[in-house]
Amino acid sequence: MSLLTMIAKMSEGFGRTCAIFFLTLIFSLPLGMIVALLRMSKNKVVSAVTRFFISVLRGTPLMLQLLAVTYGPYYLFGISVSRNKLIPVVVAFSINYAAYFAEIYRGGIESISPGQYEAAKVLGYTKVQTFMRIILPQVVKRIMPSVTNEVVTLVKDTSIAFTVSYQEMFTIGKQIANSQTSFVPFVVAGVFYFVFNAIVDFVMGRIEKKLDYYK
Amino acid sequence: MILELKNIKKAFPYRNCEEKGITDHKDGDVNQVLKDISISVDAGEIVSIIGPSGSGKSTLLRCATGLETPDSGEIIYADGVKFGLVFQNFNLFPHMSVLDNVSDAPIRVAKKDKKAARQEALKWLDKMGLGDRGAAYPCELSGGQQQRVAIARALAMDPEILFFDEPTSALDPELTGEVLKVIKSLADLHIAMVIVTHEMAFAQDISDRVIFMDGGLIVDEGTPGEVFESANPRTQAFLGRYKSGNW
Ligand SMILES: Nc1ncnc2c1ncn2[C@@H]1O[C@H](COP(=O)(O)OP(=O)(O)OP(=O)(O)O)[C@@H](O)[C@H]1O
Ligand SMILES: [Mg+2]
């Protein structure tokens, strides 16, 4: 198999890699905020339960969570494993990344000085207005570097989808590598991820720069 | 009368870090910060609150502005009276331009027309000597300028009473004057002001009434002349330290 054929075949999987990447971000970024707010809830039970789930999600391998989401329903309830593996992959990834984002958000929210809330309160802002207009914009700026880290990790983590044979780029690359007894597909995959992350770095850098208008 | 505070009491659990080592507090011991404070403020009146560190001045302002809930007592604002608060460390919104800092609450909270609110904000900034800094961000301003923006922000909500909690304590001495000057310039707006300050000359100069607090109680109260010449030994001791410049 020529190098070009390999690249062409793997490129087909690249669309699916992108699907995992973008869908995971779309779901986990907001879900993480909900989890963070539950984690900071004044209700002790709510915050303790949330804290427990976060620690499980961060303390066990994503691969294991992916297997559990994909095959768990079959073993537990006899529900047949869905043909389209994109669904369990995105579900598992979104939940896992939401846990990480939640902790990043929480750190960001807790780093805002109480004086900001007090100033807003005396001026008469509602709680929702205070959060949306005063707190959140400052949090976004502060957490950008940590979020970038997670996003870069996510690019590489998409390859974990091979454990459930979802035909994303790495899975295809691995299949070619096996059938051709060649190491080349792995090199190609490496270059793919590297270029992908270079783009991610560039985009995140632009966003950080945009937020650089104040200290 | 636009504000009446009646028999305000407030206690805090002891903070472990600072109070520890001074005395051994038993579990459940509380720090009775405000013991029984009653104050009334008339429209347009300028009241200074002075007193040693820890006497409860900030706590009193925080109770009056709803940032703390008193354990007992009443806080009564006359109908429709709005208040503002200027903090020691400004608490400007760093992600908003100076103009937005001043005009955002009038627009979002008071639901004023956007254009009118911005014009009014500019007017207040102008009064603070910052008419040309509307586009700047707080981090680009000196402490004195930031505090003047904070004053403009409070004024833009049309308060009838404005509280100041040591508005110049976070400033370098050379910036203190400019802030005290603009506060003084507000006197003719007929907005009542309650000013916690360690600037004794300023308090003496600007106030209609001076309140001396110590240990969670009002120890002395009267015109600047009365309080600064008071025969009360605690007032004398406190002011004596100030007069000798020995802080
Ligand atoms: N949230 C809080 N929790 C516990 N203790 C508090 C709290 N706020 C204030 N205190 C305590 O209450 C006492 C009075 O504090 P307060 O800030 O009202 O004094 P102050 O007169 O404003 O002093 P300063 O001149 O230093 O600003 C202090 O002993 C302080 O440690
Ligand atoms: Mg104080």
Image: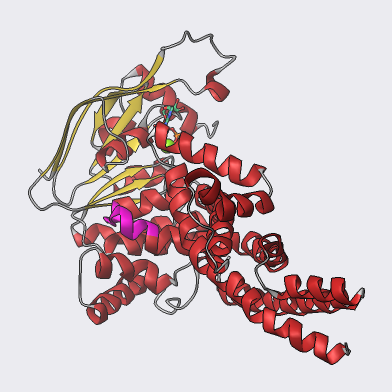
Quadrant in the rendering for residue B155: bottom left
What residue is shown at x 44% (from left), y 58% (from top)?
A135
Image quadrant holding the C terminus of chain A, namely: bottom right
**Relative depth, front residue between A1 and B54:** A1
Q: Residue furthest right?
A: A182
Residue A161: in magenta span: no
Quadrant in the rendering for residue B10: top left
Residue A127: in magenta span: yes
- Looking at the image, residue B132 sits to the left or right of residue B77; the answer is right
Quadrant in the rendering for residue A66: bottom right
- Looking at the image, residue A8 sits to the left or right of residue B148; the answer is right
Image quadrant holding the N terminus of chain A, namely: bottom right
- Residue A112, position as x, y percentages in the image: 50, 51
- What range of the chain is rendered magenta? A122-131
- Residue A12, position as x, y percentages in the image: 68, 84
What residue is shown at x 75% (from left), y 71% (from top)?
A170
Q: How is the image coloured?
A: secondary structure
What residue is shown at x 21% (from left), y 57% (from top)?
B159
**Relative depth, front residue between A124 and B36:** A124
- Residue A150, position as x, y percentages in the image: 66, 61
- Looking at the image, residue A12 sits to the left or right of residue B222; the answer is right
The majority secondary structure of the magenta stretch comes to helix
- Looking at the image, residue B196 sits to the left or right of residue B93; the answer is left
Confirm whether residue B82 shows in the render: yes
Answer above or below: position of A207 versus B23.
Answer: below
- Residue A195, position as x, y percentages in the image: 77, 80
Number of marks present in the image shown: 0
Ligand 2 - quadrant of the structure image: top left
What residue is shown at x 75% (from left), y 85% (from top)?
A9
Answer above or below: position of B130 versus A162.
Answer: below
**Relative depth, front residue between B194 and A96:** A96
Confirm whether residue A104 shows in the render: no
